[in-house]
Image (spheres, rainbow, N blue to C red):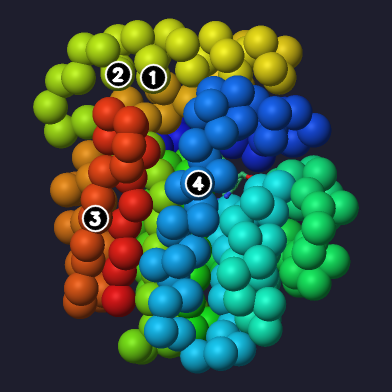
Amino acid sequence: MASAATDVRAIFDRIAGRYDTANRVMSAGLDVLWRRRAMRLLLDGLDPSPWVLDLGAGTLDGAVEILRQRPSAQVVAADFTRAMLVAGRRKPGAALVALHAADSHRLPYRDGAFLAAFSGFCVRNLRDPALGLAELRRVVRPGGRLVLLEFFRPARPRPFWDGLVTNRLMPLLGWAASGDRAAYRYLPESIRRFDTRGDFEARLRAAGFATVRGQDLFPGGIASLVEAR
Ligand SMILES: C[S@@+](CC[C@H](N)C(=O)[O-])C[C@H]1O[C@@H](n2cnc3c(N)ncnc32)[C@H](O)[C@@H]1O
């Protein structure tokens, strides 16, 4: 979770042009597979032409994957860092995505505007996650679904993954790929300050999602996928 003192928008504004490279290097390309898997879960059995929100869409990797899997979807990508959306807009398929500069704490959409919503690695950055989830609940139609990818604080110590990978290797690779040391120091710090997956699933239930299912992703459960309906 972002501390009150952290200027999250300024961090993503600085790294927007190098964000994708840093992601691929830090995850060894696994982030692409994680999004594919998330979108299969999001779109499975859904209406042929659903309205889908990608919240904290960043450089649009999630939004274009939704369209790759479901070309007839109406995809809206919302993010409060314009530079991230701009960095993604030349990707194949991105021209079909509606880009909105919007803050997750106050979404400019009517109640039930979307049949489905995805959010990748965004909710951990929110100043007030409960408010962000209440907004997501409000804009996703009853009977709709939400799928999130996130790095959660581990429920039990994982000396190898946390001591070496999350706290050292990922910030180092992120720094090398982006040239921005502070941005990639913020990554493990935000994970340490955030919920465990169990805490977060309880938040989703409190926000009004009746069915919540989470799973840890390979390798080491370093990232997780959570589905809520
Ligand atoms: C780690 S990036 C993830 C981008 C993309 N979803 C992905 O999977 O690569 C987090 C994104 O969330 C956005 N973000 C953080 N807090 C936000 C907020 N309060 N409202 C809207 N976007 C926010 C940031 O600007 C950034 O683009």
Label 3 to label 4, Cα distance in Å?
17 Å
Task: Categorize mark 2 by other alpha carbons within 10 Å: few (<14), some (14-19), many (20+).
Answer: some
Residue 44 pos. (x, y %): 42, 77
The label number, if any, that marks residue 166 in the structure image: 1
Q: Is residue 169 left or right of residue 205?
A: right
Residue appearing at x 22%, y 31% in the figure: 154
Residue 53 pos. (x, y %): 57, 71
User: Cβ of disc 4 within 8 Å of ligand 1?
Assistant: no
Residue appearing at x 52%, y 15% in the figure: 171
Name the residue carrying label 4. 33
Residue 5 visible in rendering: no
Q: Secondary structure at mark 1?
A: helix
Q: Earlier in the sequence, mark 3 or mark 4?
A: 4
Residue appearing at x 63%, y 13% in the figure: 175
Q: Amino acid at mark 3?
A: Gly
Q: Earlier in the sequence, mark 2 or mark 1?
A: 2
Name the residue carrying label 3. 214
Residue appearing at x 44%, y 58% in the figure: 38
- Assign the C terminus to one quadrant of the image: bottom left
Label 2 to label 3, Cα distance in Å?
19 Å
User: Cβ of disc 3 within 8 Å of ligand 1?
Assistant: no
